[in-house]
Amino acid sequence: MQGPKAWELVVAFIDDSREEGETITASSQMLERAFADRNGCDELLARHARHWDLSRLAMVDRNILRLATFELREGKTPFKVVISEAISLAKEFSSSESPRFVNGVLDAVAREVGRDTGGAGESK
């Protein structure tokens, strides 16, 4: 998510994982799709990260938001699961304020995506 320069490092990190082959393959494929869709995700995030310029967000927060926004737009995973996992990542890898920020932005993104897709991906 940092751009083409970091792509090889990210692929090596995933490949070095101790996860099962199926998980590594799924992760790599999702990362490729999310990277290809980052501009669309950024446009959506910019509408909901009020008072924040995406380029000024902490890199970890920005990339957590991008990945989660991609998943919300893809609609394959229930919104609550995507948001919960993003909050967990923010708790583990970012600042103490990040989980609340990530939750607020993604909640707004999920509402917009839910309207655009007729609610696909939402868990009720």
Image: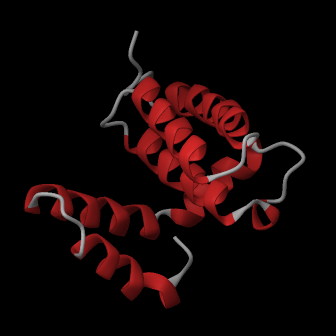
55 with respect to 80 (left or right): right
Q: Taking 89 as reference, is 14 left or right?
A: left
Q: Would you place residue 34 above or below residue 72 in this image?
A: below
Occupied quadrant, residue 34: bottom left
Q: Residue furthest top?
A: 124
The location of residue 5, given as percent across then percent down, is: 51, 90
**Residue nearest the observer in this picture, 25 or 20:** 20
Q: Is residue 14 left or right of residue 26?
A: right
Q: Identify the residue at image location x=49%, y=46%.
A: 68
Q: Which is more toward the observer, 49 or 119?
A: 49
Figure disc tally: 0
Return the x and y of residue 48 as percentages of the image width and height: 74, 40
Q: Residue at x 71, y 48 (%)?
A: 95
Above or below, 10 relative to 63: below
- Give the percent coordinates (x, y) of residue 113: 53, 34
Residue at the farthest right position: 51
Viewport quadrant of the C terminus: top left
Against 14, is 102 above or below? above
Q: How is the image coloured?
A: secondary structure
* Residue at x 22%, y 75% (from the top left corner): 15
Q: Is residue 54 above or below residue 79?
A: below
**Where does the image place residue 20, in percent across and percent down from the top left?**
11, 58
Question: Residue 90 is drawn in which quadrant?
Answer: top right
